[in-house]
Image (cartoon, rainbow, N blue to C red):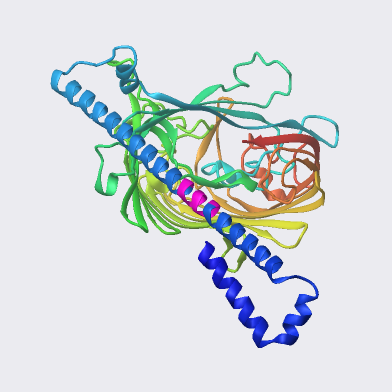
Amino acid sequence: MRLTTIYAGMSCLFIGMVSPAISFAAGNTLTIEQRLALLEQRLNQAENDARQAKLRATQAEQQTRDADARARMAENRVQQLENRTSAVEAQTAETGKKIDDTALASARTRPADNGFEFSGYARSGMLINSNGRGARGGPGVSPASSIGGDAHVGRLGNEKDNYVELSFIKHLQFDDGSKARFKTMLADGANNPDPWVQDNDSHHLNVRQLYVEMTDLPSFSGPVKNATLWAGKRFDRDNFDIHFTDSDIMFLGGTGGGINDVQWTPHFKNDFSLYARNFGDLGSDRYNDNDVQNVMLTANSFFDNWQLMLTGMAAQGNDELKDNTSTTGSYALRSDNTAQHGYYAMLAYHDKERFYGVLPGSSESALQFGNGLGAEARQPGSDGDLTRDAMSVRFASYGILPVSKNWEIAPSVIAQHSEDRYRSGDRYDWVTFNLRASQAITQNFALLYEASWQYMDLNPNGRTYNNDGDIDAYQAVKGDFYKLTFAPTFKVGDVFDIKARPEIRFFVTYMNWDKELDRYAVNDDFGSAGFTAGGNWNFGVQTEIWF
């Protein structure tokens, strides 16, 4: 350090000799010794700063070494735990005994509870006519609805029943990664408006679904790696409908089993199912229970938004029923050539993002064909009264379109042609157009509008029915039916969503139809006392919810 000071002093002396003017000016303020002292002080400070920096660097290196050591220790502990686990598993596999009867073994043999789920649907309200009495109505109010039960009109302001579905679901998950799901659904429907109903003919409490699903099975691979097995009583997973008319586009159900999501390619998959439905007791003297079972084998193929459904069915003994009353619960009588076999096909397109591929929204459409027992297009296999030659063609479609900031509309159409359905030579043609519109007024209030029109051309060709012990014949009729509804509605959630629930709505409905339709049957709604052509008003309030 002293050599550095001497060199600095000599440099300053040299500079002073070369520049006397500068030296003279500086000399007026500081002497050479003072300036050398200041310079030495600065050099000492610089050396001290350098030592501090070196100390900090040394400390940082030590901290890094400590962190590395801790990481190595953690890795060693993890490795030790893995070695212990491997040793335990090896010992368990070798001895065939559980290592820990109260902990490890219990965890490996019992499923873990992955949650309980509760869901439901319900509608309830009152429907009165302009005279203040209980009104007639319902989506299936027209004569055409007696043909398979699916010729529905708009349901808004047109329902008098109280109906509820309560679903209880249990999810189970196992240590091997497999999962199970149990579901049961209780349902009840009644037309009686009383708060407590003891009449069993009014209430129809039923267990509508009861089944188990299994998925993520570790022994499955290839196309069935992510497939789901199921068995029990259920609605098929791929059913879909038109909510605004309460019309199933496709409803497949019963008791049986199947497999879903057999994935052949990223865009192509299959569902396979085997269902059985009941057509009634043959009345055998030898057996107490000899029900006719319609057994249906279905293959559902999905390619992106497209769906192709093929179903074959057989009901052994259906053509030998000794009781000549209808198997569908109606008053109609069976023919002498009821079917024992049938087949059914449906081509459908589902678009959850576009309104018929044109605008943002959604739409679903289906073209359906059936023969024999498959001629019931809405619920394949559910009608045992169909003839061997029965044939049906059906088209169904609906869409939901947001029109503006406050308006949303939902048009729909269903049309069906069937022949040789219940008698050779009969023919039933009908078509329904429906439009539901929603106008959002405030965050919790909307105005709902609905207009329905239905045309019927029905030729039963001698089909008969039981009328209080008398045998009468259905009459050939044709004509129009229309319905208009206005419903101020309170909502929570997204008031703009036409399918958002719950809703509480007040409504007024006007219905009218051609007078000729009153002649279809003497026990039909049309033509009954107080419910004839010429105009009918209904009023009421209703709540609807699903979750």
Q: Nearer the viewer, residue 268 or 232?
A: 268
Q: Quadrant of residue 264?
A: bottom left
User: Does residue 451 appear in this view?
Assistant: yes
What kind of secondary structure does the magenta stretch mostly adopt? helix
Q: Is residue 56 magenta?
A: yes
Whether 362 is drawn above or below 444: the answer is below
Count of numbered labels shown in the rendering: 0
Q: Position of residue 47 (x, y in %)?
A: 55, 58
Q: Residue at x 62, y 63 (%)?
A: 40
- Viewer-side residue, 391 vs 472: 391
Whether residue 82 appears in magenta in the rendering, the answer is no
Which residue is more in the foreground, 187 or 534? 187
In this picture, is 454 found above or below 541?
Answer: below
User: In this orientation, which residue lies closer to the viewer: 118 or 373?
Assistant: 118
Residue 123 horizontal side relative to residue 128, left or right? left
Residue sitting at 50 percent across and 44 percent down? Answer: 462
> Where does the C terminus fall, quadrant-wise?
top right
**In the drawing, does residue 29 fall left or right of residue 379?**
right
Q: Which residues are magenta?
A: 52-59
Pinpoint residue 503: horizontal percent, then vertical percent: 74, 39
Q: Percent x, y for residue 146?
A: 56, 41
Residue beneath the point at 55% across and 51% down: 52
Occupied quadrant, residue 103: top left
Q: Determine if residue 274 is in view.
A: no
Residue 511 screen position, x and y as percent: 76, 47
Residue 281 horizontal side relative to residue 208, left or right = left
Q: Residue furthest right?
A: 131
